[in-house]
């Protein structure tokens, strides 16, 4: 099988690309940094941005004028529908691409849309079966993070984004993910789930194994943080409280050592239990 990049280069110019939207100095600055990370590892990928400010053409091949009358969250859904690409990877501005991610587009050979599960569950589960659904959706249905979305451009997806935008407006939600979850559950869209390596949320404690390809979080030293986390491909745990400490950024642990330690503790507990029964 040829690599996704070879397939892309042999295809139509706008068959695959990356999309951003940004309004305001802070988000435009983030978008520039994110696009730089994209072009560093995928120089042949097309990029597009929806913005109210002209931006460097070497970073954004296609620039779409943002309407003034659309709110910032609604603009996200508007932008998704205006993608110039047949297959789109949408990225929030606070993302950093550490490695080539052409393979994400291969997901669209099987699914219409794919996202990663958010590490911060939006539904608070209660004990003893206290809640089994929320807003008509089973509590066990995953909440997906909308900061990294790979999707097809077709009428079904366009209708889905339109329904999402309408529900978001009807609910008066500040966050876009709860109405996305509800809209997805009640749709017949074929969706896939990405591992956290393709949307590693830095604001929350988490664990990772292998190389992280997409980091996601508002951090001033984002590139440096990403480099430190990817310094190892073994199991490691990261926590936001380490991000601004120059000496400790993340903790590594050995799965074998952890299992060995757990086994020793279990054996000691068993010995104590047997001693008590013998007495």
Image: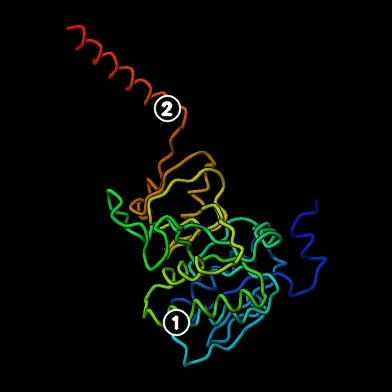
Q: Is residue 104 shown left or right of residue 193? A: right
Q: Image height check: is 35 above or below 52?
A: above
Pointer 2 residue: 259
Residue 36 x, y percent position in the rendering: 59, 68
Q: Is mark 2 on a helix, strand or loop?
A: helix
Q: Which residue lies furthest to the right in this view?
A: 10
Indicate which disc, 1 or 2, sits on the residue closer to the N terminus.
1
Front-most of residues 78 and 183: 183
Q: Using the rendered view, name the quadrant where residue 47 is placed.
A: bottom right
Residue at the (49%, 76%) spot, across then down: 164
Residue at the (58%, 86%) spot, across then down: 54
Q: Which residue lies furthest to the left in this view?
A: 279
Q: Is mark 1 on a helix, strand or loop?
A: helix
- Residue 103's mark? none
Residue at the (63%, 70%) spot, across then down: 18
Residue 207 x, y percent position in the rendering: 44, 46
Pointer 1 residue: 72
Q: Residue furthest bottom?
A: 69
Residue 175 x, y percent position in the rendering: 39, 72
Q: Image height check: is 40 above or below 253?
A: below
């Amino acid at each position: 099988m040829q690599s996704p990049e070879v397939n892309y280069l042999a295809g139509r110019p706008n068959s695959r690309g990356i999309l951003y939207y940004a309004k305001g100095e802070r988000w435009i600055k983030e978008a520039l940094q994110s696009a730089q990370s994209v072009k560093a590892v995928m120089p042949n990928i097309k990029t597009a941005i929806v913005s109210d400010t002209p931006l460097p053409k070497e970073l954004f091949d296609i620039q779409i004028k943002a309407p003034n009358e659309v709110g910032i969250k609604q603009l996200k859904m508007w932008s998704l529908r205006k993608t110039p690409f047949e297959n789109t990877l949408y990225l929030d501005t606070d993302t950093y691409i550490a490695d080539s991610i052409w393979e994400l587009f291969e997901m669209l050979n099987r699914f219409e849309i794919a996202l990663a599960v958010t590490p911060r569950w939006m539904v608070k589960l209660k004990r003893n079966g206290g809640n089994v659904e929320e807003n008509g959706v089973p509590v066990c249905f995953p909440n997906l993070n909308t900061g990294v979305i790979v999707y097809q451009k077709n009428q079904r997806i366009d209708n889905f984004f339109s329904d999402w935008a309408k529900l978001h407006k009807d609910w008066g939600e500040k966050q876009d993910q709860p109405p996305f979850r509800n809209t997805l559950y009640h749709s017949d869209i074929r969706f896939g789930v990405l591992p956290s390596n393709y949307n590693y949320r830095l604001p929350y404690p988490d664990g990772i194994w292998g190389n992280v390809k997409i980091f996601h979080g508002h951090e001033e030293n984002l590139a440096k943080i990403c480099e430190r986390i990817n310094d190892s491909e073994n199991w490691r745990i990261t926590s936001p409280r380490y991000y601004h400490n120059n000496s400790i950024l993340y903790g590594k642990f050995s799965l074998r050592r952890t299992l060995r330690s757990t086994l020793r503790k279990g054996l000691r507990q068993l010995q104590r239990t047997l001693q008590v029964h013998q007495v």
